[in-house]
Image (spheres, helix red, strand yellow):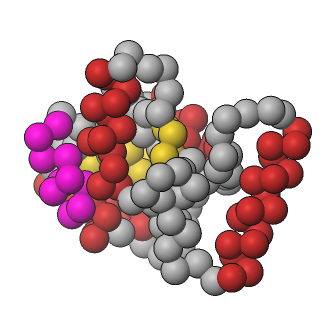
Amino acid sequence: MRPLIESLFHTLASIEWEAIFVDDDSLDGTAALIREVGRLNRRVRVIQRIGRHGLASACIEGMLATPARYLGAMDTGSKHDESILPIMLDRITAEKLDLVIGSRNAEGGSMGDFTRGRVALSRLGSRLSRGSRPSVIRDPLKSWWI
């Protein structure tokens, strides 16, 4: 978690930002670590949820906890690249867009070091999701948005 936080400070140095981590009462000390960092820097906060779980509800709860005009969401347990956040922010503001999505299937994206099975599972999930609703989003399962 510390490398991600350090990367956010570096990547977003020229941007006014805050990071709200939503922890589903994990046993690995994540909430305590985020609180420790937050005591030193008000840009970092944690919401520790007791008895609630799930990425979608965590995103919603984190978004409701900020007055920010632009929001970004990512699963910190995944392999999202926070360095693209300034590019996404530039695009959404310059083009006056409602939504920007970063996808591993977009130009410049990659599956990283996923195993062959994980890649196949990701592609299957994307195909199933597209079959339920026509969309130009190619990676509906693990996206970021601002």
Relative to 117, residue 32 above or below: above
Percent coordinates x, y for residue 110 in the rendering: 50, 65
Percent coordinates x, y for residue 121 in the rendering: 76, 69
Percent coordinates x, y for residue 10 in the rendering: 15, 56
| Towards the viewer: 65 or 6 | 6
**Residue 7 within the magenta-colored segment of the rendering:** yes
Relative to 38, residue 97 above or below: above
> Which residues lie in the magenta part?
6-15
Give the residue drawn at x 27%, y 42%.
86
Give the residue drawn at x 33%, y 59%.
34
> In this orientation, does residue 45 appear?
no
Furthest toward the top, the residue is 96
In terms of image quadrants, where is residue 26?
Answer: bottom right
Furthest toward the front, the residue is 107
Give the residue drawn at x 73%, y 33%.
135
Quadrant, the C terminus: top left
